[in-house]
Image (cartoon, rainbow, N blue to C red):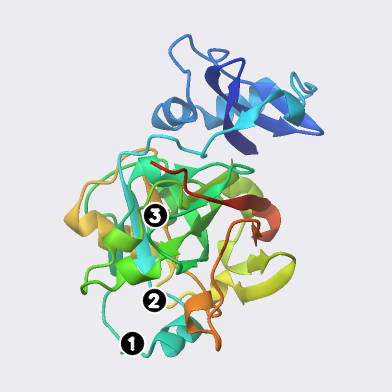
Amino acid sequence: MKLLSFIRLGKPSFGAVVKDGVIDLTSKLDPDVNTLKDLISLNLENEAEEYIAGKTKDLSFSDITFMPVIPNPEKIMCVGLNYLEHKKETGRPDVDNPTIFTRFADSQVAHLQPLIKPDNSDRFDYEAEMAIIIGKGGRFISEEDALNHIAGYSCYNDGSVRNYQRHTSQYTPGKTFPGTGGFGPYMVTPSEVGDYRELPIELRLNGNVMQKAKLSDLIFPIPRLISYVSEFTALSAGDVIVTGTPGGVGDKRNPPVYMVPGDVVEVDIGLLGVLKNPVVAAPKL
């Protein structure tokens, strides 16, 4: 099942993707279930799947405006240097634990919405990543049980402002500028994905393939990421873990390649769909 958040007639809503459109699930399963995060928190995915069985679309995609899959996650935890080729191109050493930084929810944009190139940087880089959305929260989650805590998977573009990222050893200033993180188009449930390690991941900039790998290439696999994060913070339903980017980032190319206004960037993760965003200049303040 594919689930998404969207705006319809000015109202935030959520629903399920069916052939050629969307079934609106807002308040359909329970009057208080108005967001995808509500659905996940109450573990109503099975009820949603039963509700949409045999139904046709309520809305066409042209009737809606996509929102980030989870517009208001309590936490967004991002993982750095989690593919061997990317670690090699950065020259960073091997480490025993995942490299973790954070992103703020208001830095996210949805499928088809513009990524915003900051006006104080010309080093706006792309990063294709797979995001996992937590379904069942908890602390000290074991690696053996970790996959049972996943509500679904999605595409993410962890757009990076490289000069701000490198002001110090801490990444966060370059990772959470407004409008720099693409998230979507929808969340795909584990039952539809199967083994996430079989998924391909590819980024295209203006149609040119810039990054290409498989999820099986992750240095720290998803169970390790969930378990590790849950050691230092309680995970909650709707939290997002962005799992790392493959080699081929623009900053490490010769010459470097950065995103500029007019570009179109796509993150393609097979069954998870294609996240597509144009790039625009930041509005003048």
State the CA–CA distance, disc 1 to disc 2: 8 Å
- Mark 1, other Cα within 10 Å: few <14 / some 14–19 / many ≥20: few
Q: Amino acid at mark 3?
A: Ile
Mark 3 or mark 1, earlier in chain: 1
Q: Which residue is mark 3?
A: 241
Q: Judging from the image, what secondary structure is the residue with disc 3 in?
A: strand
- Return the x and y of residue 228 as percentages of the image width and height: 27, 63
Q: Amino acid at mark 1?
A: Arg
Q: Identify the residue at image location x=62%, y=50%.
A: 277
- Return the x and y of residue 73 as percentages of the image width and height: 36, 39
Q: Identify the residue at image location x=37%, y=65%.
A: 79
Q: Judging from the image, what secondary structure is the residue with disc 2 in?
A: loop
Q: Which residue is mark 2?
A: 81
Mark 1 or mark 2, earlier in chain: 2
- Mark 2, other Cα within 10 Å: few <14 / some 14–19 / many ≥20: many
Residue 188 in view: no
Quadrant (top left/top right/bottom left/bottom right) for the N terminus:
top right
Quadrant (top left/top right/bottom left/bottom right) for the C terminus:
top left
- Return the x and y of residue 2 as percentages of the image width and height: 64, 39
Q: Which residue is mark 1?
A: 92
Q: How many marks?
A: 3
Q: Nearer the viewer, mark 3 or mark 1?
A: 1
Between 238 and 207, the residue placed more toward the observer is 207
Marks 3,1: beta carbons within 8 A: no
State the CA–CA distance, disc 3 to disc 1: 22 Å
State the CA–CA distance, disc 3 to disc 2: 14 Å
Above or below residue 191? Residue 227 is below
Residue 3 in view: yes
Mark 3 or mark 2, earlier in chain: 2
